[in-house]
Amino acid sequence: MVSHALNKSHLDGDAALNYVDKKKALWILSVLWPATPLVGLYLVSETGWSIWYGLVLILWYLIIPALDFVFGQDYSNPPESAVEKLEKSTYYRVLLYLTVPIHFAALIGCAWWVATQDLSALEFIALALSLGVVNGLALNTGHELGHKKSSFSRWMAKLVLAVVGYGHFFIEHNKGHHRDVATPLDPATSQMGENIYIFSLREIPGAFKRAWHLEKERLARCGSSPWTLKNEILQPMVVTVLLYGALIAAFGTIMLVFLPIQMAYGWWQLTSANYIEHYGLLREKLPNGRYEHQQPRHSWNANHIMSNLILFHLQRHSDHHAHPTRSYQSLRNFEDLPALPLGYSGMFFLALFPAAYRAVMDKRTVAWAGGDLSKIQIRKGKRAYYERKFADAA
Amino acid sequence: MAKYQCPDCGYIYDEADGDPHEGFGPGTPWSEVPESWSCPDCAVRDKIDFTPIDGGSQAAEVGASTPITPDGSTTTSAAPGAPFRKWVCITCGHIYDEATGDQHEGFAVGTRFEEIPDDWCCPDCGASKGDYVLVRD
């Protein structure tokens, strides 16, 4: 009802003029968050305490969920009449651009530290995983930039995705995942009863294959083979090869261990996001053979304010999927959306434990479908089990 | 040369310019764009969903229950005397019926959807006018 009341209030026409985005300054947290591994290194050098190598992990898995609990959820929406001004504001765009060099700095800074300092195995792994979490968010930054229409934003997207070696996301997500989301065609939509480890084996190769296919198709229309620098998967890949090659050349063979660990954990963040964002959800197939349009109810949403502020509103995923080119500052909450019980960092952690995840999410998914299991994507072989389990749900 | 607009994000395919990045050279007619092609900017609408503007015509009749959104209001405006239409909010299913208007919202019987202010929001869930899609019977 909160969003309703807010949205109605603009009918008098003054709301747009008077509207102040209370989160405006706070979005800077999304820019600063990728610098956290460097802050950790600074604290190590100041105090000598090893624990700061894991600063990101402590914040991400403990402090952010705790702050989500303390600060709760934010249901407010900008009045629709203020959205045009919000979308045009340079400020929000500049924040995104500023985030890009910070991702590069975090990678290069941590690589330099690993090469020049004497780290124990535990410290080494803590730093690599910390960088991995933050680099997973390079995918978030690249995600927001890749949905923009200007070629500068799209180039920034490709550059930041190159930091984590996942440049094909630019094609895969925007042209593949968004088209096929919440259908059996989408390797990046998880099924009810599918655990994250099985899902990752379907999602990671499936995403690359779909991206390659889409780009090959486009280039064929352009009269070109996929083996060209016009290929928007190869473009960021070249940047990754040059960047990682330079780091190996500069910092030696230790990079051959460090870079793959942080990269794999960065990819895991994306897999976690994909896993929780559409778990079990299914778009209905229409009589004409097409799937119904992508609606807000086809994505799990989270309004947790703290985690949203470090993720450029990624968790307001329902509106994002219904209207992919809408910018982060304008994303809305709606009533009756399928809602995650925790912010992403808490959900990512929960997903690591399949039985616990199912205990939390399966009943919510069944409730979303009104108890009708035929409206849910269910992992092959699990349907009979769920029919028994939720026999009384309908 | 006709133009076709994505009803979700506003992307325009102009036959005169084509879209060379998508592999359609200048002058490529809409009919030569593959049916499987999706909007290159948002990907949540396909060729069949695009609305013709500036004299274009949609070759294939859009199937029943396939919605068209009202963003390009000039393209979907009803001629005087045209049958009344219904619009549905994609987020909550609220229906605006031109035939009955919406007294509570201050829209008299027969108020056309395009006469409703662009900043009007769904009275049930707060979604914007742009979240409404045309119901085709």
Image (cartoon, coloured by chain):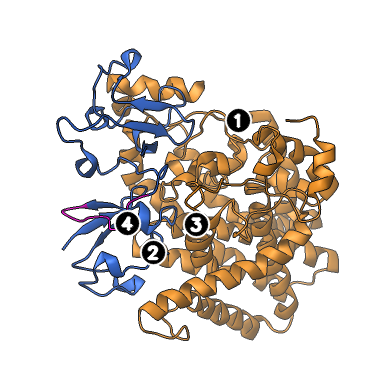
Chain colours: A orange, B blue
Cβ–Cβ under 8 Å for marks 2 and 4: yes
Q: Which disc is residue A73 wearing?
A: 1
Measure how far apart labels 4 and 3 are at the Cα level: 21 Å
Please give left or right for residue A333 compared with residue B47 in the image.
right
In the depicted structure, whether residue A295 falls above or below residue A194: above
Left or right: A131 as drawn, with respect to A75: right
Give the amino acid at mark 3: Arg
Q: Cβ–Cβ below 8 Å for labels 1 and 3?
A: no
User: What is the span of residues highlighted in magenta in the rendered image?
Assistant: B53-62
Mark 1–mark 4 CB contact (< 8 Å): no
Q: Position of residue A125 (x, y in %)?
A: 79, 65
Dot 2 falls on a residue whose secondary structure is: loop
**Residue at screen point 74% across, 40% down:** A361
Residue A247 falls in which quadrant of the image?
bottom right
Q: In 3D space, how far apart are the residues under numbered discs 2 and 4 (Cα atoms)? A: 10 Å
Residue A167 visible in the picture: no
Identify the residue under disc 2. Answer: B35
The numbered disc on residue B70 is none
Please tell me how crowded label 4 is: few (under 14), some (14-19), or many (20+) other residues with Cα within 10 Å: few
State which chain disc 4 sits on.
B
Instruction: Say whether residue A78 is magenta.
Output: no
**Can residue A335 be seen in the rendering of this structure?**
yes
Q: Position of residue B12 (x, y in %)?
A: 27, 57
The mark closer to the camera, 1 or 4, is 4
Distance between mark 2 and mark 1 Cα atoms: 42 Å
Q: Which residue is mark 4?
A: B60
